Amino acid sequence: MNLLEVNDIHVYIQSFYILHGISFFVPEGKTTVLLGRNGSGKTTAMRAILGLNPPRKGEIIYKGVNIAHLPTHKIVQRGVGYVPDTRRIIKSLTVEQNLEIALRKGSKTYDERLSEIFELFPDFERFLGQKAGSLSGGQQQMLAVSRALINDNDLLLIDEPTEGLSPLLAKNVLKTLHAIKEKRKTVLLVEQNFAAAKSVGDYYYIFDDGKIAHNGKMETLVDDHELISRYLGVNV
Amino acid sequence: MISLIRSINSNEDYKKRLILFLKIFIALISGIITILWIILDKAELPNQIFKMIVGVWIMGLALLSIPTPRKEKLPQIFSLVEIIVISCLWLFVEVESKGVEIFMQNGSLTLVNGLAFSMLLFLMTSGFFLIFGLADIINFAHGAFFMLGGFMGYEVYLLSESFLITIPFLGNDPVLLSFICFIFGLIGATIILGLIGIGIEVTTIRRLFRKPISQILLTVGFLYIILQLTEIIWGPAIFTYNYVSGSQTGIFWLPRSAILDLGGGMRFEIYRIFLILFGLVIAIGMFLVLSRTRIGLIITAGIEDPEMVNALGIDTKRVFTLVFATGAAMAGLAGAVAVPQVNASLDVAGNYLIYAFIIVVIGGAHFGRFAGTFWASIIVGLSHTFCQFFYPGLESIILFLILLAILTFKPGGLTGEPM
């Protein structure tokens, strides 16, 4: 069953035509990866789902309801967590305050949710009182992911989580993605790092110039060296 | 010249060295000129030259606020030593020429007056900063809100007096009656301006989100509408609590003639002390709200990244409305509390708007913090009052000199980042 269905959306940023009628599906409990070169429209697709760049035409069906023209906060309140590509943590607040403003009312208490985050990031407890701006790149990424996990979100939109991180930190982030996957969370992931994408992804969509060039199960893509090299510029 | 500019743009190292050189040069020149000024002070140099020299001295002061990398600590240490030496020399000359008692009297009086003025500026500008910081709206109508707050406070004062005077124990105690009416005036002005703020935000400003030019034109329009309406309703009159026209008792609870005498010539207007305490209480309250409550944290986060706050599931439009209303309400409160000191008149709208701009730029407008506005208000209030007292005539240019120094050396202001 698909948790999210994107049907023929056309997205403009100011007068630029970015997404030319793309469609894709995100099955429940699976990780779907959007692949493609820089500027192919992956992040815009994610922002369109969130209502930050709403589509001029097309439907975005989430849990059976068209959310294409809802305001961003209403979309998020329906159970969508977002980890943006540049992390965008609030630097002037502490780590705990960052989590506090992200927290929405739900079935679990704040402490229960916090202990779940500590399970995932054991080091995190030490940083709670620290200003978020003083964290290292990897720690900031942890915070950005935690901010999305602090609520019981049904869908996680994660945009390039390994971008700008050292190989060691990227490996840690990947470990986190695997842990999220084990919890059977539904994830839509944008990832340039093909090795990371193939290790966590169940399904893929390759974006090319605002259109979807190819899609399928991740295991089929792994064997298609020509496709990978043509669209992703990666020599396998 | 062009090749020099090019080389500055293309070569980061060269640029850094040039800035370092400029810092040392300005600190050195300002130091030499100031020492000369102090030495020549007794020779009675023309007043105009003093003014220019003090300006350069202030430039030296501004150098202190420049953050420099660890390797470039020299100019900061130099500036610090220079300022301490110059301040000691200045103190020595002042005390020598005027005597300890006169100096203490003048100094303490200026300090109290300056702090009272600073708090007034802070009360008014805090709302301006919140509106600009969170919603990127340069609210030209803010000065008019401040002015209107004064008139509203005055009207609510008279209205509540006409009701409360009928209560026997208040009718017999005009001072208590005046105090209660004044508090009603403050609350009334705050609520009325808050409601006006909500009305303006919901009906117009909201529709011009991220259209700065349109917002400026709109708020300038509101500035003129409010000014003209005020003139139509109240005429060009100046209202003051020292002579409460329309009051049935004619007595104000804390007139300007109420003086706190500490002896030794140190006499302070009690209302100014009240203003300092009132401003501090509001500042602490606002600081606690912004740093301890969820809505405060959301506002702080919204100043830094409104889109991300929206993507966390928070209705930023409602937060904008709340902040705009709070900003207008704070201006109303400031206007009402200012009237016993600066009187309610049409002139204050424009005059105080300029202060708000200067303070927000010095404190740090872009990604700036609330504390920046507080300290900038203190800097502006004190430097203005000190110059007014010790170097009359200079007060009108001193603020722009500080502004110039900040924009040159720390374009993001005390707490913000460059635009």
Image (cartoon, rainbow, N blue to C red):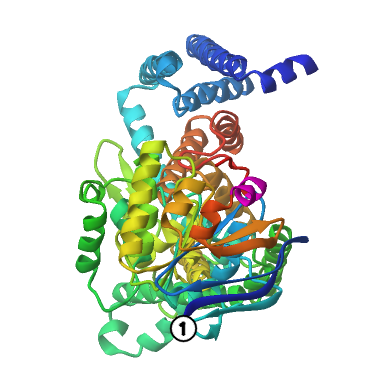
Up-down relation of residue B184 to residue B269 (above or below): below
Q: Name the element at disc 1.
A: helix
Give the crowd class for mark 1: few <14, some 14-19, many >=20 residues within 10 Å.
Answer: some
Q: Nearer the viewer, residue A63 or B289?
A: A63
Q: Point out the image quarter for the C terminus of chain B.
A: top right
Residue bearing mark 1: B159
Of helix, strand and loop, which mostly describes the magenta segment?
A: helix
Q: Nearer the viewer, residue A25 or B287?
A: A25
Residue B212 image position (x, y, % from top left): 69, 58
Residue A211 image position (x, y, % from top left): 70, 62
Q: Nearer the viewer, residue B207 or A11?
A: A11
Up-down relation of residue A38 to residue B71 (above or below): below
In the rendered image, the residue lying farthest to the front is A223
Up-down relation of residue B413 to residue B154 (above or below): above
* Residue occupying the point 22% across, 56% down: A118
* Residue occupying the point 67% across, 64% down: B219
* Residue B290 in view (yes/no): no
Chain of residue at mark 1: B
* Residue occupying the point 47% across, 25% down: B61
- Image-based side of A186 in relation to B28, left or right: left
- Image-based side of B73 in relation to A122, left or right: right
Q: Nearer the viewer, residue A49 or A206?
A: A206
Amino acid type indicated by mark 1: Leu
Residue A203 on the magenta span: no
* Residue B324 in view (yes/no): yes
- Image-based side of A205 in relation to B267, left or right: right
Which span is picked out in magenta?
Answer: A225-231
Residue B344 image position (x, y, % from top left): 55, 64
